[in-house]
Image: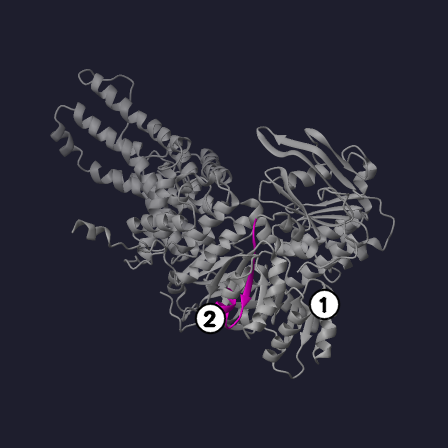
């Protein structure tokens, strides 16, 4: 009987197999683009050279948190002289590292698609211009948010651990748990959107990066100069400082109002003005993006 | 699976003007059947513009187009779900692996991630990149890049693929391999529109030819039919065409000896079958070698040239 | 179908790699770039008429073309154009023209301006030369349009016109027919053949073998930096006597005719498929002579007879295998 087994044979088609499985809608496409963009920016599945920068910057930004916790621990019994501990509010701020990070990440996520002419392949897929914009802005926002949040987590957990009673610390600082994510989110959306808009205008990453830095620094320097001339060091002009604009919103989240020490401090309805300008900037940016990706250059 | 009843695409008075004055397409009206179709025209004739209109990437200035039975104007997304596109230009990110890129494009076409990986693997195997697919594309030759481009067009199991100059930059071996791949697509039930300026590519692979020039339709017809030439027989008898000609004229057949040494016999009202038999018998009688014999044009090039000179 | 041109490159006795009245000679030419050997002791020559230069990517065609036109020097061996070293002699350089495939053209100039510029550069005195050259490549109608807006095929033609204007004796062209439509290609092919007939040495490199077949009677085939074959493609095919040629025959009584053919000693194999036969033989001529007789004996109509290996493409395939 065993001989009969060898008597039967068949060759199965090794050619093309059609696909009959499920297909995701546009949402799936957006999700796929979102994930692919994040992977690219973080250097996952790419050479180690491309992985280095984002993580090095993240390390740099986490240093203050570590230092804070360290000194807090060391001086827990004796008061620290001359060292001002960083507050959560201040830590959710624009540091040069964050700026550099956005100037590196946004172009990296956006420009190569245009540079290598991948756009025509992407748009031959079942997706529309605003799907692309959503995925790209979403990806950069997520990364920037993560970048801001991680050091905060280190700081909070660190502080919790070196304090006298971890649970007490948690209870006393409970509002931080919502303030930090909201503020970081507002900042992330803002910087990410501007980053993507500027990057979408060129196919070269370096040009985009430099343009972003210029866009951040120039209005800041100019408005700074204008305000310095003003007697009481605060003026509505501060709203035009694109770099620091979301910081006012951050202050509103943490303090309920604009920081009195900031250039917008003495201005009446300063918070409202900041919020209005913030919205305006975002709307303009999105409008430009939708136009840019409506008929993509092949 | 390809639905054989609907045409691959139907253009109706399709016109596209670009700002700056160029008329890329001018009232193009043609119905292109399923199967393998060659879209022929010089660079600048409007082939790439037509592809972009088919994909709904740009809108027509006038007229309309339907792809796989669906109007592009009303549902470009739906159309793109059924289409695969292989552009002429370089379009692959150079720092990733072929497997990664094709899988990503599969996901972008709507395949779930695991299925996308699987399909990418299958399709890269199909185009002959089974070993190289895990290497970075930075070291890929033109042939390998072209094949990866084809793979991404096939990964989502399209009904119809648009290939823009797929043999560009390939050496004769690469061309042959690419054309063989394109031919196989038909056996998988995938329809093809092959845009090229090379008639020889079309002749070997396509069942139907559409020729455009200056944005207008020049002709559209099955390859076999185009190559047909009623009432003429051409033969090569190894340089002895004069002798053959004399003998055939003796038997009442008009024969001309052409520049390249071949003989052309024209049937004036006689049945072509009878002509063929007389020719065969005459050649046999004279003991001449019959190197070639045909009742059609030798190549599509000849077809178009005779058309052009007849204009 | 390759056709005879009025001027066929006469060959020196024996070796088809060398032309009798050679204008471009290459002897033991070796070129390497670091570890990569582009050309390896290549010896061949080119003469008046049109010669095709073929080979897979990386075979050394571009390197050879650049060496022939003096753009790069041999690491060993030598190149002589009209008897002189193309790198050293300015006079020879004036008689040489290279039309590379991928070189950019200055987009802001019109076709006429570009050709005139090249004419001035070469000190061409004849005022009608510019117009004549534009006419040769069918660009007279668009001569005043900016080259930047030209399609690929048109840009190729402008480059050819510019190359022609100094009236070169030796013209080397890399993929000159790229991007042109059938009518333009026919004109260009006719142009090159005319130039060859005038006695110029025209060397054309192309991957589109059907075109090279129509264009050039003589071919030089390179493989991996070495000379793989030289001569007319049918002659080369004949030289590969050990590989049988195949012929397609379409006839109603295919199976019977196939059986008949198998009876011939010259036939090495026969395949039948649905009304058509493919016959393999190393003595194709004998089979061709016997075929009509056998068909008549069986009273079966010969609808089509076609040699399958007659093209440059199939020759190429055989060589590269």
Q: As rendered, which of B303 and A162 lies closer to the eye?
A: B303
Q: Which of the two labelled residues, at mark 1 and mark 2, occupies the earlier sequence position? A: 2
Between label 1 and label 2, give the one nearer the viewer.
1
Highlighted magenta segment, given as a residue range: C243-258
Q: As rendered, which of C169 and C106 lies closer to the eye?
A: C169
Q: Are marks 1 and 2 on the same chain?
A: yes
Residue A226 x/y as whole percent: 48, 37
Q: Chain of mark 2?
A: B
Task: Residue C36: name its quadrant.
Answer: top right
Relative horizontal placement of residue A71, taking residue B297 as reference (left or right): left
What's the residue at 15%, 32% (across, down)? A170
Q: Can residue C207 be seen in the rendering of this structure?
A: yes
Q: Is residue C141 above or below residue B167?
A: below
Relative horizontal placement of residue C142, taking residue A256 as reference (left or right): right
Q: Secondary structure at mark 1?
A: helix
Q: Distance between the Cα atoms at labels 1 and 2?
A: 41 Å
Relative horizontal placement of residue A219, taking residue A251 as reference (left or right): right
Which residue is label 1 attached to?
Answer: B241
Q: Secondary structure at mark 2?
A: loop
Residue C250 is a magenta residue: yes
Q: Chain of mark 1?
A: B
Residue A31 x/y as whole percent: 32, 50
Residue A115 x/y as whole percent: 50, 45
Residue C183 x/y as whole percent: 67, 64
Which residue is label 2 attached to?
Answer: B33
Q: Is residue B90 above or below residue A68?
A: below
Residue A170 is a magenta residue: no
Q: Residues within 10 Å of mark 1 (few under 14, many from 20)?
A: many
């Amino acid at each position: 009987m065993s001989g009969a087994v060898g008597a039967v044979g068949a060759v199965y088609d090794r050619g093309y197999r059609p696909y009959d499985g499920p297909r995701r809608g546009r949402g799936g496409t957006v999700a796929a683009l979102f994930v692919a963009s994040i992977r690219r920016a973080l250097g996952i599945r790419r050479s180690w050279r491309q992985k280095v920068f984002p993580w090095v910057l993240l390390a740099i930004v986490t240093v203050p948190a570590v230092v804070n916790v360290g000194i807090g621990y060391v001086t827990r019994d004796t008061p620290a002289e001359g060292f001002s501990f960083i507050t959560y509010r201040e830590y959710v701020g624009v540091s040069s590292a964050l700026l550099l990070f956005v100037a590196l990440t946004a172009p990296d996520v956006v420009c190569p698609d245009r540079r290598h002419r991948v756009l025509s392949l992407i748009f031959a897929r079942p997706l529309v211009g605003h799907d692309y914009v959503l995925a790209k802005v979403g990806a950069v926002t997520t990364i920037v948010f993560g970048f801001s949040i991680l050091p905060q987590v280190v700081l909070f957990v660190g502080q919790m651990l070196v304090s006298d009673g971890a649970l007490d610390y948690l209870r006393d600082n409970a509002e931080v748990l919502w303030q930090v994510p909201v503020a970081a989110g507002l900042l992330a959306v803002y910087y990410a959107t501007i980053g993507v808009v500027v990057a979408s205008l060129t196919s070269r990453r370096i040009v985009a990066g430099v343009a972003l830095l210029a866009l951040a620094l120039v209005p800041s320097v100019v408005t700074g100069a204008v305000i310095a001339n003003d007697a009481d060091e605060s003026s509505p002009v501060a709203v035009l400082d694109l770099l620091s604009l979301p910081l006012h919103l951050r202050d509103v989240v943490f303090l309920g109002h604009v920081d009195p020490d900031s250039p917008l401090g003495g201005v009446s309805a300063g918070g409202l003005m900041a919020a209005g300008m913030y919205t305006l900037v975002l709307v303009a940016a999105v409008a430009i993006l939708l136009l840019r990706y409506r008929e993509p250059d092949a | 699976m390809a639905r054989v009843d609907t045409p691959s695409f139907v253009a109706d008075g399709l016109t596209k003007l670009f700002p700056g004055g160029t008329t890329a397409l001018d009232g193009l009206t043609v119905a292109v059947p399923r199967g393998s179709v060659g879209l022929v025209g010089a660079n600048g004739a409007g082939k790439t513009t037509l592809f972009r209109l088919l994909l709904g990437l740009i809108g027509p200035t006038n007229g309309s187009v339907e792809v796989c039975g669906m109007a592009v104007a009303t549902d470009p997304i739906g159309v793109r779900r059924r289409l695969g596109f292989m552009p002429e230009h370089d379009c692959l990110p150079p720092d990733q692996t072929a497997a990664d890129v094709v899988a990503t494009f599969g996901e972008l076409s709507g395949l779930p991630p695991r299925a996308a990986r699987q399909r990418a693997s299958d399709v890269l195997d199909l185009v002959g990149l089974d070993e190289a697919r895990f290497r970075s594309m930075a070291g890929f030759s033109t042939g390998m890049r072209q094949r990866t481009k084809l793979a991404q067009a096939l990964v989502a199991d399209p009904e119809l693929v648009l290939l823009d100059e797929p043999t560009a930059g390939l050496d004769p071996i690469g061309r042959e391999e690419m054309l063989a791949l394109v031919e196989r697509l038909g056996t998988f039930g995938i329809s093809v529109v092959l845009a090229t300026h090379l008639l020889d590519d079309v002749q070997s692979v396509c069942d139907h030819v559409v020729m455009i020039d200056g944005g207008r339709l020049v002709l559209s017809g099955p390859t076999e039919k185009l190559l047909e030439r009623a009432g003429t027989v051409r033969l090569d008898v190894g340089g002895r065409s004069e002798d053959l000609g004399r003998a055939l004229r003796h038997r009442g057949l008009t024969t001309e000896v052409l520049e390249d040494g071949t003989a052309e016999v024209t049937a004036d009202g006689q049945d072509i079958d009878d002509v063929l038999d007389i020719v065969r018998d005459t050649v046999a009688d004279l003991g001449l070698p019959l190197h070639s014999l045909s009742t059609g044009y030798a190549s599509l090039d000849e077809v178009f040239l005779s058309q052009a000179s007849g204009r | 179908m390759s056709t005879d041109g009025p001027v066929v490159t006469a060959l020196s006795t024996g070796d088809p790699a060398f032309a009798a009245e050679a204008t471009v000679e290459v002897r033991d030419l070796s070129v390497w770039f670091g570890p990569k050997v582009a050309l390896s002791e290549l010896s061949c020559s080119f003469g008046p008429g049109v010669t095709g230069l073929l080979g897979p990517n990386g075979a050394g065609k571009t390197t050879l073309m650049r060496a022939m036109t003096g753009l790069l020097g041999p690491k060993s061996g030598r190149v002589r154009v009209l008897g002189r070293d193309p790198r050293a002699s300015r006079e020879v350089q004036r008689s040489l023209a290279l039309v590379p495939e991928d070189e950019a053209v200055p987009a802001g100039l019109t076709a006429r301006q570009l050709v005139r510029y090249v004419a001035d550069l070469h000190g061409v005195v004849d005022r009608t030369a510019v117009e004549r050259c534009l006419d040769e490549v069918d660009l007279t109608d668009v001569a005043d349009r900016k080259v930047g807006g030209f399609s690929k095929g048109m840009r190729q033609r402008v480059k050819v016109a510019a190359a022609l204007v100094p009236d070169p004796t030796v013209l080397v062209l890399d993929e000159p027919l790229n991007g042109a439509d059938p009518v333009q290609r026919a004109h260009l092919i006719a142009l090159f053949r005319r130039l060859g007939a005038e006695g110029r040495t025209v060397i054309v490199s192309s991957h589109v073998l059907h075109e090279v077949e129509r264009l050039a009677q003589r071919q030089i085939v390179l493989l991996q930096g070495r000379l793989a074959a030289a001569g007319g493609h049918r002659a080369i095919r004949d030289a590969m006597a050990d590989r049988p040629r195949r012929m397609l025959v379409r006839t109603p009584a295919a199976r019977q005719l196939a059986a008949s053919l198998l009876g011939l000693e010259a036939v090495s194999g026969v395949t039948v498929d649905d009304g058509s036969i493919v016959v393999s033989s190393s003595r194709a001529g004998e089979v061709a002579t016997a075929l009509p007789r056998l068909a008549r004996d069986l009273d079966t109509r010969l609808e089509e007879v076609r040699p399958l290996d007659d093209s440059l493409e199939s020759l190429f395939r055989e060589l590269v295998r």
